[in-house]
Image (tube, rainbow, N blue to C red):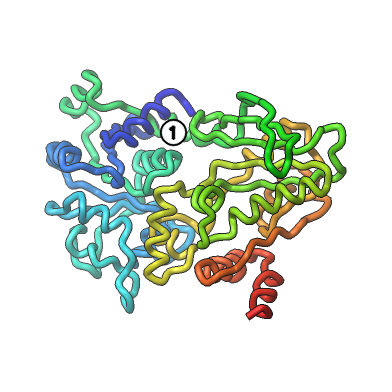
Amino acid sequence: MTHKAERGLFELRQGRALCVTDEGRSARVLVAAVENLSVDRLEQLHSLGRPLRLVVTPHRAQAMGIATHEGETNLSLRLGPDATSDTILGLATERPPAGSPGRSATVPAAVSGSPNSLEARPASSAESAGLALIRSGLLLPALVTVEVDPGSQVVTRWIEDATILEVSSEDVECAAARSGIEITSVAETPVPLADAEHSRFVLFREGGGLLEHVAVLIGPREAWPDPLPVRLHSACLTGDLFGSLRCDCGEQLRGSLRHFKRRGGGVLVYLAQEGRGIGLGNKLRAYTLQQEGLDTIDADRVLGFGADERRYEAGVAVLRHLGITRIELLTNNPHKVRAVEDGGIEVVERMPLYGGINRHNIRYVQAKVDRSGHWLMDMISQHASAD
């Protein structure tokens, strides 16, 4: 990530405003993350005397009943003058009321115009750059913005006295292009495990500097089988560490290590992609929506995310860095197989990897099959037979 974009993300994570300029500096937009929008920050944006706007992803817009086409761009909605931090947060996260066509209950109070005639337009390049920046930091994908005149003396003074930082949309685009593609090996050391005493941990850092991934090398490399068993495992704090019953992640993690031991070696690439790439905070928000009856994919969409935000370029880069080219991939996910093959790694075999099914995760597992095409029907059939 470029130096300025990295600093800009830090500013947004700290709850401060950021000035984003578009190409040629012909437009300036002040942006602030909805997730940590304070009363003081809202007052600072209002002080410029221009209408505030809420910028959301097309997934969130659809959940609000505003956008209907999957391919639509980010949308910018004009906020009413009485919108508060709480109503704006609700506008960005609320589940539409049951039986409604999709519109959030907060829309009439927080957005100017009638509920059936919202003032919405495609987000500008500067607004979309700001949204891309907070998404890279795993914040809730929603921004409050205010357009300012390029020659605004107030904003110029804020930039000059370091009250706010200025970042260009080009800085953000360059940062996004680097993320996940460039990786650096940071440290390596032996870490004996209960199920694999001969193990080494290798830490990798992405080019953007924000995300770190770990490769766990099981068994002596000279004794590794061919093809090499490999598991690309997205981090799951609740399942991997605490044994949550809402998913099967922890069981898949431990099952892969047992398989490596039986086969005489293998590599686990532990990717920093909590909650299918939306981050822990948003994952917990999605859990709350699931408690209200949504499945895992619809819950993520209500928050403004796609069905699966994970990317596997970093995992492929780790394998290539380790000199691994032929693998037995432990997965039930067809998209992961395709991503690894597209990255130039030969998937000689695919090994299914099942966890257990219980009353807490049955809808989650079923959604994987019905909504994402995962190969889990055998697992569900075995559960049905047991019942």
- Say what amino acid the circle numbered 1 marks: Val
List the single residue furthest toward the front: 194
Q: Quadrant of the C terminus?
A: bottom right
Q: Secondary structure at mark 1?
A: helix
| Location of residue 67 by image quarter | bottom left
Q: Is residue 275 visible?
A: no
Q: Position of residue 342 (x, y in %)?
A: 72, 47
| Location of residue 227 by image quarter | top right
Image vertical order of residue 112 relative to residue 170, above or below: below
User: Which residue in the structure is indicated by mark 1?
Assistant: 172
List the single residue furthest toward the top: 161
Q: Position of residue 310 (x, y in %)?
A: 56, 49
Q: Is residue 151 toward the left or the right of residue 378 in the image?
A: left
Task: Sort mark 1 into few (<14), some (14-19) or many (20+) by Cα contacts within 10 Å.
Answer: many
At 30% across and 26% down in the image, what residue appears? 165
Q: Position of residue 78 (x, y in %)?
A: 23, 53
Q: Is residue 208 toward the left or the right of residue 9 in the image?
A: right
Q: Nearer the viewer, residue 136 or 73?
A: 136
Image vertical order of residue 127 relative to residue 99, above or below: above
At 59% across and 55% down in the image, what residue appears? 249
Q: Position of residue 75 (x, y in %)?
A: 35, 53
At 22% across and 25% down in the image, what residue appears? 163
| Location of residue 252 by image quarter | bottom right
Image vertical order of residue 314 relative to residue 360, above or below: above
Q: Is residue 378 toward the left or the right of residue 69 in the image?
A: right
Q: Is residue 316 visible?
A: yes
Q: Nearer the viewer, residue 375 or 301?
A: 375
* Number of numbered markers: 1
Image vertical order of residue 47 relative to residue 368, above or below: above
At 47% across and 49% down in the image, what residue appears? 278
